[in-house]
Image (tube, grey):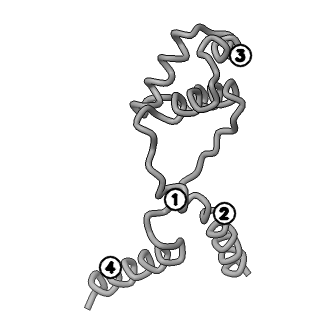
Amino acid sequence: MLRVMRERARLELERKVRPYRRARTQPRPTEGWLRAMRLAVGMPAERIAEKMKSTPRMVFYLERAEQKRRISLERLEQMARALECDLVYGLVPWQRSLEDRAMELVEQDLWRKRFTARR
């Protein structure tokens, strides 16, 4: 029963990860997502700062922090909301699928047991 539940959970997660796999192939804007989005929608930093109850200087600081990959998720979400956007966050396995990764771990475990077993 537990095995069936795990399999269903794995399949459901695999289905949810598919869109993120496609997104992973798109290059990140050199100026960062926040600045790229702000410029694309034509929203001045002053307006964003007002929505965040902050200053334009903080908006530019957060854009640089995101560009350098040093922004917290909380701040990223605040800025996304000020830009009238949703923050979508996900993890994508490097392997082709979760099943492939699971099989790799099983094989590693079998090899470890085979060569560490007492004779």
Work out whether mark 1 precedes mark 4 in sequence or the reverse, and give the earlier one. Answer: 1
The spot of residue 24 in percent (x, y) is 49, 56
Contact between marks 1 and 4 (CB within 8 A): the answer is no
Question: Which label sits in the foreground, 1 or 3?
Answer: 3
Relative depth, front residue between 59 and 93: 59
- Residue type for callout 2: Lys
For residue 112, the mark is 4
The spot of residue 62 in percent (x, y) is 51, 21
45 with respect to 31 (left or right): right
- Residue type for callout 3: Lys
For residue 103, the mark is none
Work out whether mark 1 precedes mark 2 in sequence or the reverse, and give the earlier one. Answer: 2
- Residue type for callout 4: Arg
**Element on which disc 1 rests:** loop
Q: Which residue is mark 2?
A: 16
Q: Which residue is mark 3?
A: 51
Work out whether mark 2 precedes mark 4 in sequence or the reverse, and give the earlier one. Answer: 2
- Tell me the CA gap for discs 2 and 4: 32 Å
Q: Which residue is mark 1?
A: 92
